[in-house]
Image (cartoon, rainbow, N blue to C red):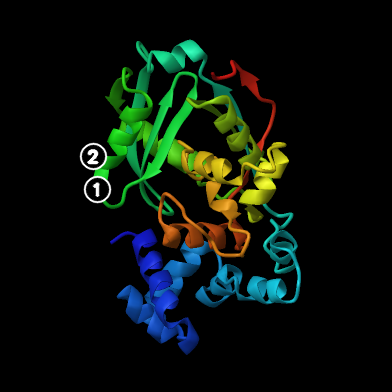
Amino acid sequence: MNDYERVASVIRFLDRHHTDQPDLAALSTAAGLSPFHFHRLFSTWAGVTPKDFLQCLTLEHVKQLLRDGDNVFDAALNAGLSGPGRLHDLCVTIEAASPGEMKNGGAGLEIDFGFSETPFGQALIAETKRGLCHLSFVDVGGRDRVRNLLKSDWPNANLNRNDQRAAELAAEIFARPTQSQSPPRLRAFVRGTAFQLSVWRALLRIPSGSLTTYGRLSAGINQPRAARAVGTAVGANPISFVIPCHRVIRETGALGNYGGGPTRKKVMLGWELSPGAPRGVVETDLFGATAA
């Protein structure tokens, strides 16, 4: 069991027993570790103690603000879910596949892919010479499932296994930088419709540690009546975490769906809110052909 799986088991335990206010001993038992080793592992992984992490993670304060009349976005901000200034930004430039490249399914395209451990479990990460093209987490269905997801996006591309390169990309994407470090730049090469691209670019404008709703996201791309279609486009995001679909919640304040599972979504949000958190993902200058 890796570190993410141990943390995820604790989050699932808290979903069932949060009203009992479990202490460190109960949490460490859920993780299958001694209190000392669990506290050390968790603090190293998240950068905060288990208690502080859970305080960041809870949405109970948001729900109370909603009951008091705040809209969900303001409630999230007032609950401290807006990214603190100490967060660094991971600069991402998206290049869109041309209509011809979409039609031919990546014919002649070389894609290096591999499997790597991340703070949120094992992931398949893939890139072309033009940039990162896929990131998804290995869960039910195992490696074959996520490899098939990559293949469905680029059915005619040549896939080359390269776990070393995947590990290098994971280290860059999920690094916790020092204040003196300049944020690296990532280039993404994606296959999507013009509408999907507009949604994915809007997701990149959500700072790390912040939340938005499907309704606000649709309004932000001048499609205020398209919240359902926006939700579908969010779910079709091919580069999990880098294009931060985990930062979108329902209007009611509920976390909503996430392709990597609701537990992983909670863990990601808590990780981003903790001191020493990872860089946010923001949009910079965008270029490339517009997809059909």
Position of 167 with respect to 72 (left or right) is left
Residue 146: x and y in percent read: 31, 40
Packing grade of label 1 (10 A; few <14, some 14-19, many >=20) is few
User: Which mark, residue 279?
Assistant: none
The residue shown at (40%, 66%) is 7
Residue 5: x and y in percent read: 34, 62
Residue annotated with mark 1: 141
Q: Quadrant of residue 151?
A: top left
Disc 2, SS: helix
Disc 1, SS: loop
The residue shown at (69%, 31%) is 284
Quarter holding the N terminus?
A: bottom left
Mark 2 and 1 residues: CB-CB less than 8 Å, in contact?
Answer: yes
Residue annotated with mark 2: 144
**In the rendered image of this protein, does residue 181 appear above or below residue 258?**
above
The amino acid beneath tag 1 is Gly
The amino acid beneath tag 2 is Asp
Quarter holding the C terminus?
A: top right
**In the rendered image of this protein, does residue 124 appear above or below residue 44?**
above
Q: Quadrant of residue 103?
A: top left
Residue 155: x and y in percent read: 32, 22
The residue shown at (32%, 47%) is 138
